[in-house]
Amino acid sequence: MEACERLGGELAVAGWDIVVYAGEGNLSGESDGFIEPAVVKGYLASGAVRSASVHVLYSRRFPTPVFAGHATQPEAFEFSADLSKDWEPSFYRSLANVDAGLIIGGGQSSYLAGLVCLGRRIPLLALGTFGGAAHRALDAMIDAGTPLRREDFEVLGRPAWTPASAKALVDSLATQKASLDREREELQRERRSRRRSQNAAVAVALFGVASLLVPTALVVTKADTWPELALLFVAPLVAGASGGTVRTLLPQTTDAEISTLGSAALGAVAGGISGLLYLSA
């Protein structure tokens, strides 16, 4: 368990919070075969622990787990009882809210957790040195094209553990996170660019329709049929929707982003009000 303790200490020094799980067979926090107690022990012993930085997640079916060190550093712990009766839903559901994953040994659930992290592009450390599911997850990392450097893979797959391995592995988490954050930002920029292109096409189409409707409506001298009355009212609606859609092409001044349909609806309401006032006059 020395490797787990050293990794826990390096995670604390690097400023990471940790999320640990407890289930059947690990209710006391000190059961053999689980890495959580050793990671928490090293984390608390680092001297760099912050308040509520050890997040303990457990199923409501089980009592609140107890970890060594809780009695002396209770402020470091935050306990959350999941609503599920079984630990599996609690465990897998929580992966959507973590910034990185650490797998040492483990079984099928650990392997699946590694695949979930890879699929969601979450930084992952699968320490293959001690075998188990982590070794399989490491093979999956190689095939998945993660942003790890060659030297990071060498440390993860090293047959023997060394004291320097812990810091190298935790440092690689920061490398992965920075690279994946840049990847997500690039994807967001591409999505925003596509959305702006779509908005531009919709705005041009609506403007074209309005350009045809407005002159047609103006030549109606005596609107005594339903089509002519509808034409007088639809023209400002389309014109307003065109103007509202164009607004989405301008730089956002707030964090709130309005969809193309929402902008068109707002513009249509404004155009409709103008049309009603015109018809009323």
Image (cartoon, helix red, strand yellow):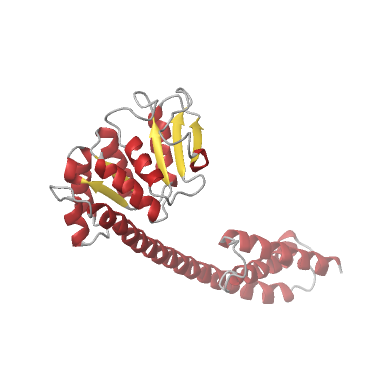
Which residue occupies the foreground of this view, 274 or 186?
186
Residue at coordinates 41% horizontally, 42% vertically from top-left? 19
Quadrant location of the N terminus in the rendered image: top left
Between 77 and 87, the residue placed more toward the observer is 77
- Residue 120 in sight here: no
Could you tell whether 86 is left or right of 136 in the image? right
Where does residue 106 sit, x and y in percent of width and height?
25, 35
Q: Quadrant of residue 44?
A: top left
Query: In this rendering, is residue 89 above or below 267?
Result: above
Residue in view at x 73 percent, y 75 percent: 218
Residue 55 in the image: state x and y as whole percent.
46, 41
Query: In the current view of this chain or complex, which residue is farthest to the right?
Result: 281
Where does residue 90 sit, x and y in percent of width and height? 43, 33
**Relative to 44, 139 lies left or right:** left
Q: In the figure, is residue 67 to the left or right of 31?
A: right
Q: Residue at x 30, y 48 (%)?
A: 7
Tell me where residue 85 appears, x and y as whole percent: 45, 24
Residue at image coords 23%, 46%: 127
Q: Is residue 1 visible?
A: yes
Q: Nearer the viewer, residue 107 or 199?
A: 107
Quarter location, residue 112 = top left
Up-down relation of residue 256 to residue 40 (above or below): below
Please identify the quarter of the rendering in which residue 148 is found: bottom left
Seen from the viewer's position, the closer of residues 139 and 280 is 139
